[in-house]
Image: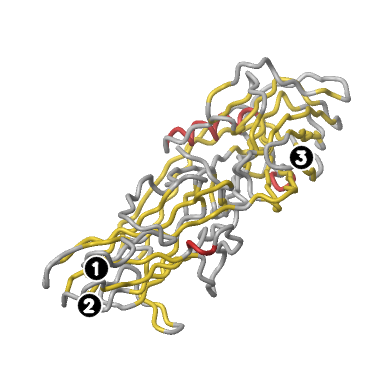
C-alpha cells in the first residue's frame, strides 16, 4: 500500500456487516494484521461505528475556461439520492496547483489559497439537491495552454470526523478555517428530522470533477546548471549540477506523477564517478543500470513532478580525478527526449538547456559551468519541492455495507 500526500493511491476494499443486534451509535474495534515471508508482521487498529446509511451523490462534472491570473467560478452540488435525510454534509477537495480560492469561508479549511475541505450543517432531505458557488482565480504561473483539474468528494459529517482524525495520525493538516463568513448550501427541498451516526454505503457516486481549460500562452524556461571544479590527480571532488525553472510558468505533473523533465550527464573523460544521486541511473544505449550506481560514463536523471517557477533542483556527483586534463569537460543536458512518461519539451529558451561541467579549467578557458555560456561560477541555490504526507482510510458500518474512502489520483498536499 502506497501512502500518498492527500489520500491513498492504493487500498484494498473491506466490507463490514454489523450483527442483527447492533444499534445506531454502537462502536467496535477492527484490527488488521499483515505478514509476509521475511518481514515482521504489522498491525493496525481502527474504530468502527454503526450508523444509518445515507446516499450522497456528487453533482455533474463541470468544465470552465480561464487564462492564467484570471477569475472564474465553479458550482458545488450534492444530491441526497437515498431515502434517509442526511444531517449535514462534508466535502473534500483534491485541487491541482493553481486553482486558488479568492474567498476563505469560515466553514471551509485552506492551506494558503488552496481549498481543502468544507463542512455544512444544513440537513439534506431525501431526493433534494443542494448547491453553492465557489470563487477561484487561476494562478498567474499556470502553464498555458493546458488543463487543471479538481476532484470533489462528498461524505457525511461522521465520516469526515474519522477522516480528519486519521489525517492527524500522520501529521497531515486539512488547513485552517477562513475568515470571510460562512458558505451555505442553497436547498431545493424541505428539511426533515435526522439523528444518530450516518455513513454512505455507496461511495462510488460521491465524486465529481472540475476541469479548467487554461487558455492563452504561458510556458517557462528551464535552464541547465553546470559546475566548475578543481583538484589534483587522485583527488575526489563534488560537482553540483542541476536545473532551474526561470519561469514564468510552474511545472506541475502531479496528476500523472511523471518527472518534470529528464537530465543527462556525460562524465568528463579524465574522471570517474564515485557518488551518484539515487534518482540518476547509468545509461548505455537503451539500457538503464541500477539507480545511484557509480563508475559509468553517461547518466540519465529524473526529478519530482512539481517545480515551481524560480526554484532550483541540484544533484551532487562525486568525481575522482584520474588524470589532470586542462578544461576536462562533461555535459549536462535537460529536456532530453525519453522513452518514459512525462517530460517538458516546450522550453522558451532551448539555448540554455545544455551546460558544461569543467574540471581544472585553464586560465581563460571554459565557461565555469554556466548554463547558456554566460561565464563565471554559478551558485546553485534553492531546493527541490519535497512532498511528504500520509493518509488513512476510515470505516463506518452502514447497514450491511462498510464505507471505504478510496483515492482516485495523486495530488500535492504538504503536511
Does the residue at mark 2 contact the one at mark 1 (Cβ under 8 Å)?
A: yes
**Residue shown at the point (34%, 55%) measured from the top left:** 41
Instruction: Establish if 355 lies above or below 140.
Output: below
SS assignment at label 3? strand
Q: Residues within 10 Å of mark 1 (few under 14, many from 20)?
A: many
Of badges 3 and 2, nearer the viewer stands 2
Q: Alpha carbon of mark 2 to alpha carbon of mark 1: how far?
A: 9 Å
**Residue shown at the point (32%, 50%) measured from the top left:** 379
Q: Is residue 356 visible?
A: yes
**Residue shown at the point (64%, 50%) measured from the top left:** 143
Nearer to me, 368 or 30: 368
Query: What residue does disc 3 label?
Result: 58
Numbered circle sitting on residue 359: 1
Instruction: Establish if 337 lies above or below 7.
Output: below
Q: Alpha carbon of mark 3 to alpha carbon of mark 2: how far?
A: 63 Å
Image coordinates of residue 270 in percent, x first then y, are: 22, 77
Image coordinates of residue 342 in percent, x first then y, are: 57, 64
Q: Residues within 10 Å of mark 3 (few under 14, many from 20)?
A: many
Q: In the rendered image, which quarter contains the C terminus?
A: top left
Image coordinates of residue 358 in percent, x first then y, are: 28, 67
Nearer to me, 375 or 128: 375
Image coordinates of residue 230 in percent, x first then y, are: 19, 63
Q: Looking at the image, tell me whether mark 3 or mark 2 is earlier in sequence order.
A: 3
Extreme-right residue of the structure: 189
Which quarter of the picture shows residue 45? top left
Task: Indicate left or right for 38 with 223 as reference.
Answer: left
Query: What residue does disc 2 label?
Result: 270
Q: Looking at the image, tell me whether mark 3 or mark 1 is earlier in sequence order.
A: 3
SS assignment at label 2? loop
Of badges 3 and 1, nearer the viewer stands 1
SS assignment at label 1? strand
Q: Is residue 20 visible?
A: no
Amino acid at each position: 500500500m502506497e501512502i500518498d500526500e492527500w489520500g491513498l493511491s492504493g487500498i484494498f476494499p473491506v466490507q463490514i456487516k454489523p450483527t442483527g443486534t447492533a444499534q445506531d451509535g454502537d462502536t467496535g474495534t477492527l484490527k488488521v494484521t499483515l505478514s509476509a515471508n521475511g518481514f515482521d508482521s504489522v498491525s493496525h487498529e481502527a474504530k468502527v461505528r454503526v450508523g444509518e446509511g445515507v446516499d450522497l451523490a456528487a453533482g455533474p462534472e463541470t468544465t470552465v475556461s480561464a487564462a492564467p491570473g484570471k477569475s472564474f467560478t465553479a458550482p458545488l452540488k450534492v444530491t441526497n439520492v437515498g431515502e434517509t435525510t442526511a444531517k449535514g454534509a462534508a466535502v473534500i477537495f483534491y485541487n491541482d496547483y493553481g486553482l486558488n480560492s479568492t474567498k476563505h469561508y469560515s466553514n471551509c479549511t485552506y492551506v494558503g489559497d488552496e481549498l481543502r475541505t468544507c463542512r455544512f450543517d444544513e440537513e439534506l432531505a431525501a431526493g433534494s439537491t443542494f448547491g453553492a458557488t465557489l470563487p477561484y482565480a487561476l494562478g498567474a504561473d499556470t502553464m498555458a495552454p493546458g488543463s487543471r483539474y479538481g476532484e470533489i468528494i462528498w461524505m457525511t459529517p461522521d465520516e469526515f470526523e474519522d477522516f480528519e482524525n486519521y489525517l492527524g495520525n500522520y501529521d497531515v493538516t486539512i488547513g485552517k478555517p477562513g475568515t470571510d463568513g460562512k458558505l451555505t448550501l442553497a436547498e431545493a427541498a424541505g428539511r426533515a428530522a435526522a439523528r444518530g451516526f450516518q455513513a454512505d454505503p455507496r461511495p462510488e457516486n460521491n465524486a465529481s470533477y472540475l476541469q479548467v481549460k487554461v487558455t492563452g500562452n504561458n510556458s517557462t524556461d528551464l535552464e541547465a546548471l553546470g559546475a566548475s571544479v578543481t583538484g589534483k590527480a587522485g583527488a575526489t571532488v563534488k560537482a553540483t549540477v542541476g536545473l532551474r525553472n526561470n519561469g514564468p510558468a510552474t511545472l506541475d505533473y502531479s496528476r500523472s506523477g511523471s518527472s518534470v523533465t529528464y537530465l543527462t550527464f556525460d562524465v568528463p573523460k579524465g574522471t570517474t564517478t564515485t557518488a551518484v544521486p539515487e534518482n540518476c541511473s547509468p545509461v548505455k544505449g537503451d539500457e538503464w543500470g541500477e539507480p545511484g550506481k557509480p563508475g559509468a560514463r553517461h547518466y540519465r536523471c529524473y526529478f519530482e513532478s512539481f517545480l515551481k517557477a524560480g526554484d532550483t533542483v541540484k544533484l551532487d556527483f562525486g568525481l575522482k580525478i584520474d588524470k589532470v586534463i586542462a578544461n576536462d569537460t562533461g555535459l549536462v543536458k535537460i529536456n532530453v527526449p525519453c522513452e518514459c512518461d512525462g517530460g517538458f519539451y516546450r522550453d522558451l529558451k532551448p539555448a540554455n538547456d545544455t551546460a558544461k561541467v569543467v574540471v581544472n579549467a585553464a586560465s581563460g578557458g571554459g565557461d565555469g559551468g554556466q548554463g547558456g555560456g554566460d561565464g563565471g561560477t554559478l551558485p546553485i541555490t534553492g531546493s527541490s519541492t519535497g512532498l511528504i504526507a500520509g493518509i488513512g482510510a476510515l470505516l463506518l458500518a452502514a447497514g450491511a455495507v462498510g464505507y471505504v474512502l478510496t483515492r482516485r489520483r495523486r495530488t500535492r498536499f504538504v503536511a
